[in-house]
Image (cartoon, rainbow, N blue to C red):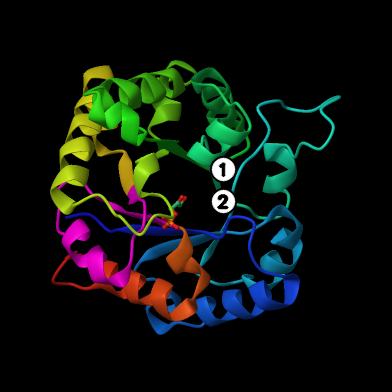
Amino acid sequence: MARKLIVGNWKMNGTLVSNTRLLREIRDDSTIQASQIDAAVCVPFLHVPEAQVILMDSALRLGVQDISAFRDGAFTGEISADMAGEFGVQYAVVGHSERRIYHGETPKTVGEKALRAIEAGITPVVCVGETQQERESGCARETVEIQLVAALDSLTTDQARGLVLAYEPVWAIGTGRSASAQQAQEMHGFLREVLRSRAESLASVTILYGGSVKPSTAAELFAQDDIDGALVGGASLEAAQFLDIVHLAASPAVAPM
Ligand code: 13P
């Protein structure tokens, strides 16, 4: 099994003071310091400059939760991938369901955001996932395939090799109701086949699971063949919980080097 990637998504939480403290606590973990795991935290944009300083020379990587679909210009309130890159940002979540639902982001917009990130040397974490209704009506696979294919259509195969995919079923986000390890594995296996059908080299793209990941559910998720790590929301807001998840992912029993 390959090395795992754990990404925290802090969403719109915390203050500069509390997030600074949280970031230091996560940064100072010995597993992270020893680079035994790939880990990143996606902080609110305004906290990026402070986070860059705190993470200087640290193995913990810096991410943001969105970026503009445009390079530059008259787009009031937007932050470009190049601007994020200037602050040492290495990951950008794009197409999170909260952006798709509350900000009307389309699969095509998400693809453009992924491309902007890659052009700026930032790894896009492209989120896909079905709603409860889509799952109940039997079109979960079709939904995530449309979302993934739209992102891939914006990228060359070479560019697509640099993305991270995150399967986040909307019904599992912030609900305390994680997908079961079997449900998640089934969808991850499907997503990997969609990637492989594009190009054999895309079969090795990292696929994270997100949606109510907790220390109590992480080990079983990480034991699945096609789950390469996690995108963690609520549990990334407490250092102890996030680090428990990091340690489970780094454990040799789960992920031999
Ligand atoms: P929760 O872990 O709070 O369910 O959030 C998941 C998520 O949306 C991460 O991007």
Q: Residue at x 64, y 70 (%)?
A: 56
**Under tag 1, what secondary structure?**
loop
Look at the image and tell me whether residue 119 can be seen: yes
Residue 195 is left or right of residue 190, and the answer is right
Image quadrant containing the N terminus: bottom left
Alpha carbons under labels 1 and 2: distance apart: 5 Å
Q: Nearer the viewer, residue 147 or 84?
A: 147
Q: Which mark is residue 122?
A: 1
Q: Residue at x 68, y 64 (%)?
A: 52
Which corner quadrant of the figure contains ligand 1?
A: bottom left
Q: Nearer the viewer, residue 144 or 7?
A: 144
How far across and down, in percent of the image, does residue 208 sit? 33, 48
Between disc 1 and disc 2, whose residue precedes?
2
**Residues at circles 1 and 2 in contact by the CB criterion of under 8 Å:** yes
Residue type pointed to by label 2: Gln
Q: Quadrant of residue 232?
A: bottom left
Q: Residue at x 22, y 54 (%)?
A: 2
Residue hosting label 2: 90
Magenta-colored stretch includes residue 214: yes
- When the figure is inspected, residue 78 is found, relative to residue 106, above or below; the finding is below
Residue 173 is left or right of residue 73, and the answer is left
**Under tag 2, what secondary structure?**
loop
Q: Is mark 2 within 8 Å of ligand 1?
A: no
Highlighted range, magenta: 209-232
